[in-house]
Image: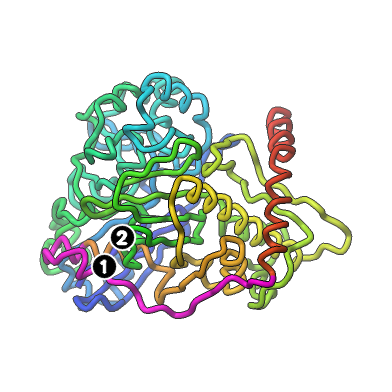
Amino acid sequence: MYLGIDLGTSGVKSMLMDENQALVAESSSRPIGVSRPHRGWSEQHPEQWWDAVCESLDALATSHPKAMGAVKGIGLSGQMYGATVLDERDTPIRPAILWNDTRTEKECADLEARAPDIRRIAGRRPTPGVTAPKLAWLRDHEPDAFRRIRTVLLPKDYLRLKLSGEKASDMADSSGTMWLDLAARDWSDTLLAATDLDRRQMPMLYEGIDPTGHLRAELAERWGISSRPVIAGGGGDNACGACGTGVFRDGEGTVSLGTSGVLFLATGEVRPSDDHAIETLCHSMPDVWHQMSVILSATSCINWLSKVVKRPASELVAELGTSLGAPSPVLFVPFLDGCWSPRADVEIRGALLGLQHSCDDEVLTRAVLQGVAFALRECADAFRAAGSTIGSLLAIGGGSRSELWLSMIATSLGVDLRVPEASELGAAYGAARLALIAESGESPESVLTSPRIKRVISPVQNLAPAYADAYDTWLSVMPEVRRASVALGNAA
């Protein structure tokens, strides 16, 4: 039996998988809140993560004690980029600065000035979401906290420390910090020095399929596990989601609709992009990399609308049906947290344009879904400009339950979307697969097989021109939306 744990921004999902890779049980924690004390800030305390993991695993141990007792391997997946800083006692010094925090625009420019070769080494230009500029911000704005830092960990690796006592990370998650030499798959002393850090403050590096330690004996006893399971390197949520759907061969890809929206493409080589804020990262297995573009708000846009109109998000989406119609007469810009990729713009914010008296919940919901689809189209265009070819994509994440939304995205991107079974737990499932490899020594090729496909969503060809025109209009309003965002932000 294998256990996959996925630390998301909104909660923890855990699942048990047997030796045949069948889902045995799953459990989710209560929602985790995000603190936003200032405009553009996004923070969580690491102890919230640990409490959520314990809640999730306690539930599995209660509901499926026999299966939990047989766990031989544990895989970890999690939200990427979060700056988790620990003191000499391994106690968090302050709340973690999360992936969707956009306070570090100045520090990004400073990082490029200090390390002019950063794009070649790290595979991309620095943007506010990644970890390194967050530490530069702490250095400049909270110097007392910065001086106390003995260890910097990513969110899921803080869980690893609590589970095993080991300070370790994997190549895929760590390559998003902008401290990793992407080609060498090792920490870069040059990039660490640019943020006044060094290797002594970094965890040991492993591939995602490697063992990194074992579960603490007292935790094995707590959850009724008969042995001390090995803990695999694991990966960031997107790399693990790709492992869950068997995406690791050159040209294979996914589109993920979770809190954020992610376009992911596996590559057999380091393929950096100088013109766009596209990430090139290590994958969770040796000698494989991937490109990734992230929009910070995807399903969170629907959740936002749900709060505004005071109706459940699922009800709003279901009300639209499953058949794609003409583009919405209202435009929605989904950058509620700013824009990270493919345009690095911390100032721009969301907008609704074209409102009139006849606009109702249905019109607004359709506009929100369409705005996210257009943001993903912008990501896809940036991939293509960087020389990548996008064939069909696997659709994963909670948003993939909406056939209408997938149809809108397929039509906007001009690609087929294949929906695998068990897509909502893709990252936790991928983590469990990595645990199987770490414990058994089986090859990644034999374990990371492609899933059975539940349905295929193809572009609606007769509507493609209309969506292309609507997308061009959406792009054209960006300069004015940005100008207004800056003005309103300065006035706040």
Q: Identity of the amino acid at label 2?
A: Phe
> Which of the image's four quarters has the C terminus?
top right
Residue 203, can we see it?
Answer: yes
Distance (Cα) linking label 1 and label 2: 8 Å
Q: Nearer the viewer, residue 392 or 31?
A: 392
Q: Which residue is mark 1?
A: 448
Q: Identity of the amino acid at label 1?
A: Leu
Q: Is residue 442 magenta?
A: yes
* Rendered view: 113 above or below 154: above
* Image point (67%, 73%), residue name: 324
* Image point (46%, 65%), residue name: 397
Q: Residues within 10 Å of mark 2 (few under 14, many from 20)?
A: many
- Are the residues tagged 1 and 2 within 8 Å (C-beta)? yes
The magenta-colored residue range is 435-462
Residue 65, can we see it?
Answer: no
Picture disc at residue 363: none
* Rendered view: 125 above or below 54: above
Q: Is residue 154 left or right of residue 457?
A: left
Q: Which residue is mark 2?
A: 248
Say which element carries label 1.
Answer: loop
Say which element carries label 2.
Answer: loop
Q: Is residue 210 magenta?
A: no
Task: Tell me the mark number nearer the camera, choosing from 1 and 2.
Answer: 2
N-terminal-most mark, 1 or 2: 2
